């Protein structure tokens, strides 16, 4: 059985959507996800400038508990788990509070994936799998299997990997 490693933030979970909400509250703006995907460069740079100076909420208790699950993620991961060995791999140890919150989140949204198949780490370069679905190029560059770049506003400029824009595209690619 082939193995798929799947990232959490901005792959299973709509983390950037929540980050945008928090930044909007903190700097009194109205940035939207669509704007960050398709808007002009100046607007994106402005947003990420605000993000870099106002992101301490990522370390606050509770942040990772209430993030919405991505569209079709539950359904497609459930189907994938019939044909592949699934591991959820999250570089979570940078955010100590997130460990328990992410386990709770997985139990809530993906109860068919148990703690035995959830890996919390710092770097991901030791992860061995056939596929890695991730939104960060730093994780995909060192991966020895087939990397799949899951589209997020911060990775639109990356062209080094096969891209998947949503979970339906993952389904089309990996499920026959
Ligand atoms: Mg991620």
Image (cartoon, rainbow, N blue to C red):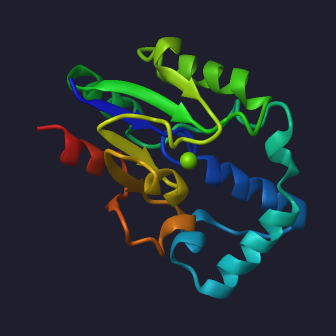
Question: Left or right: where does residue 7 sit relative to residue 40?
Answer: left
Q: Is residue 58 above or below residue 41?
A: above
In percent of width and height, residue 89 lies at: 51, 33
Q: Is residue 53 above or below residue 168?
A: below
Tell me which residue sits at (44%, 59%) in the image.
151
Q: Residue furthest left?
A: 176
Compared across the picture, whether 64 is left or right of 127 comes to: right
Quarter of the image for residue 133 reads top left
Q: Residue at x 60, y 42 (%)?
A: 123
Number of numbered discs on residues: 0
Relative to residue 165, is residue 5 depicted above or below?
above
Q: Identify the image quadrant of the C terminus.
A: top left
Q: Compared with residue 2, is residue 27 higher up or lower down, i.e. above or below?
A: below
Which residue is found at the position 64% from the left and 66% from the top? 32
Quadrant of residue 82 in the image? top left
x and y percent of residue 47 in the render? 73, 72
Q: Residue at x 64, y 19 (%)?
A: 104
Q: Is residue 103 left or right of residue 99?
A: left
> Is 141 positioned to the left or the right of 171 in the image?
right
Quarter that holds the N terminus: top left
Q: Position of residue 158 (x, y in %)?
A: 45, 71
- Residue 162: image location, x then y, percent: 30, 60
């Amino acid at each position: 059985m082939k193995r798929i490693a799947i990232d959490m933030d901005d792959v299973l979970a709509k983390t950037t959507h929540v980050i945008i909400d928090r930044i909007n509250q903190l700097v009194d703006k109205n940035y939207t996800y669509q704007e960050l995907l398709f808007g002009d460069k100046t607007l994106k740079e402005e947003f990420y400038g605000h993000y870099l100076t106002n992101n301490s909420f990522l370390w606050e208790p509770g942040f990772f508990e209430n993030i919405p699950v991505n569209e079709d993620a539950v359904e497609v991961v459930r189907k994938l788990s019939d044909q592949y060995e699934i591991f959820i791999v999250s570089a979570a140890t940078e955010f100590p509070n997130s460990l328990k919150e992410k386990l709770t989140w997985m139990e809530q949204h993906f109860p068919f994936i148990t703690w035995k198949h959830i890996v919390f780490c710092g770097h991901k370069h030791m992860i061995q799998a056939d596929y890695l679905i991730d939104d960060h190029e730093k994780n995909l560059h060192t991966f020895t299997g087939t990397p799949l770049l899951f589209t997020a506003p911060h990775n639109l400029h990356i062209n080094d990997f096969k891209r998947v824009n949503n979970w339906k595209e993952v389904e089309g690619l990996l499920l026959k």
